[in-house]
Each structure stands twice: as structure tokens, then as C-alpha cells.
Amino acid sequence: MKKTSGSYMISFLLAMALWCLPLWAEAAQPILVEGAMACETDWLIGKLENPSEQRIGGWRFVCGEIRGIPVVVSVTSIGTTNAAAATVLGIDRFHPAAVINQGTSGGHDPALHTFDIVLGAKTFDASAWISRAERRGADGRHIELRPSYYYDSDSRENREKIELEADPELLEAAVAEAASYQAGRVVSGKIATSNNWNRQRDRIRFLYEKFGSSCEEMEAHASAQICRNYGVPFLGIRILSNAELHGEEFDPAAGTACQQYVLAVIQSYAERKAIKRDSRKDLG
């Protein structure tokens, strides 16, 4: 039986659809944005168009779009365990193109003040350490960092590293938006993660001077480690909400300022990776 011109057209359209399917699937991948608390996530959730919320194992995820970009906001809750669990669930359920863990932090670098932003070129686990053998005393300065352990999907081998690097394209997109941020400075630095809130100035100085930490918080490195296991691009972005070295107390308004900057980063990265479906608009 001869094919009609109509059947040829249908075959052609089906072939094109199958060819384009991977591109459509990639374009539909959301950017997963994580924050531990309401002050770190509510502003972005309020920007979502057609939001839909779901709970997975108690962790909250709000899906939607921001100016044509698919975004999932994950409210991880506080701490490394919550961050790791929420990141696993978020990656398994939503298959994100990238993960940005963002929110508030305490300053370590004496050059930084509240509302300055640290782009986590590197993260490390400040609670993973081994102390020097000593019969007496408990000198917290006599410690060396221990590595984090993860599975490398490219080599299919288990790896260990003390510091995990940010995805270079995500970091580049964040650096490109630094000039648009008016509430403080934006610097590339090193994020120290642990379940501690340090208020002792000598210990803060020690962590900065010995390990080069720019700021401390409770989630970023845990999320980075999970993303490394899955091979998902990751970046930690942290705003200083308090700076003990300068006597600056916690200011929750910093969480909103960070989200506003993160939105600019989302748009920049989406343009670079062609996950955006409409022309760029003002942030508003």
C-alpha cells in the first residue's frame, strides 16, 4: 500500500517528536532551591506561578514557575540530616537540572558584615575532625579536618574529600549577578557546615584562620555531598545574617535579601542552560 502525503507527514512529525524528546525533557527539569526556614524560602514561594505543594516524608516541596523557569522550592528544615534527606528526596522526585542551597549564615571572615553574600566556591564539614592525642585537656584548636565520603558516578568509585567544589557554571552565573546586588558585597568563599552555632569569637577566628571559612551554617555541605553522589550541579549561596566579630545580631530580613539575589542567579543560569521558556523580564 502506498503512503499518502498525510501519512508521510504524520511519520515525519512522530520522528521529530522522538528526536526532540530528550531536549524537551531537559528543558522541563526544574531548578531545586533549598532553604531551611520560612525566612529563607517564603519570598521565593510567593514568586511561584501556579504553585503546588507536596510533602514527602514530612519534608515540604513547592513546585511552580518563575517567569517561565520551572522551580521547586524545598523547605528542608534545619540541620545536616534534614538537608541531606530533603536533597535525596528532591533529586529522586523532581530530577532537577541543578540544586542551589541558600539562606542565612554567621560570618567568619572579619572583612564581611551582615547582608554580605558568600558564594560557596567550596564547602566543608566543620564537624568532621580528628583531635590530637592528649592525655589531659580538651584544646579545640588541636584538630584536623576529616573528609566527606561520596560515590563518584563517573568513575563508579567511592571517593573522599575534605572540601567539595561548586559547579563551575552555577558559580559563574552567580558571579555574573554580583553587580546587581545592592544590599552588600558578594564574594566567592568557603562555607563551613555543621550543626553548631558558634558565638565564641576565638573559635570563629580559629576556623577562619586555620581552615579559611568565610561563614558557617547548617545545611550546605550536606546537600553538596548528596549532589556529588547523584552528579547534580550544586552551589551554596549564603548571606550573613549575623556577625559575632562585629557584634551584629541575627537579622531575619537577610533571608529575603538572599532570595532576591538567588532569583537573579536562577534566571542567569536558566538562560545559560536554555531552561527558560520566555524572554527575560525584570526581577521586580
Image (cartoon, helix red, strand yellow):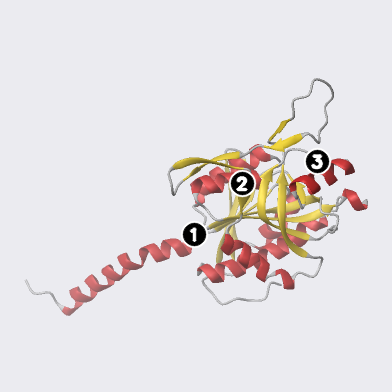
Residue that extends furthest to the left in the rendered view of this protein: 1
Position of the C terminus, as image quadrant, is: bottom right
The reply, left or right, for residue 202 in relation to residue 9 is right
The residue shown at (59%, 62%) is 170
The reply, left or right, for residue 201 in relation to residue 58 is right
User: Which element carries disc 1, helix, strand or loop?
Assistant: loop
Height in image: 146 above or below 135? below
Residue 251 spot, x, y in % from top left:
85, 53
Residue type at mark 2: give it: Ser
* Residue 223's disc number: 2
Tell me if residue 146 can be seen. yes
Residue that extends furthest to the right in the rendered view of this protein: 247
User: Which label lies toward us, 3 or 1?
Assistant: 3
User: Which element carries disc 3, helix, strand or loop?
Assistant: loop
Height in image: 225 above or below 278? above
Quarter of the figure with residue 44 = bottom right
Quarter of the figure with residue 267 = bottom right
Q: What residue does disc 3 label?
A: 197
Q: CA distance from mark 3 to mark 2?
A: 18 Å
User: Which element carries disc 2, helix, strand or loop?
Assistant: helix
Residue type at mark 3: give it: Trp
Residue that extends furthest to the bottom in the rendered view of this protein: 5
Tell me if residue 248 can be seen. no
| Crowd class of label 1 (few under 14; some 14 to 19; many from 20; radius 10 Å) | some
* Residue 86's disc number: none
The residue shown at (74%, 60%) is 258
Position of the N terminus, as image quadrant, is: bottom left
The reply, left or right, for residue 249 in relation to residue 264 is right
Q: What residue does disc 1 label?
A: 29
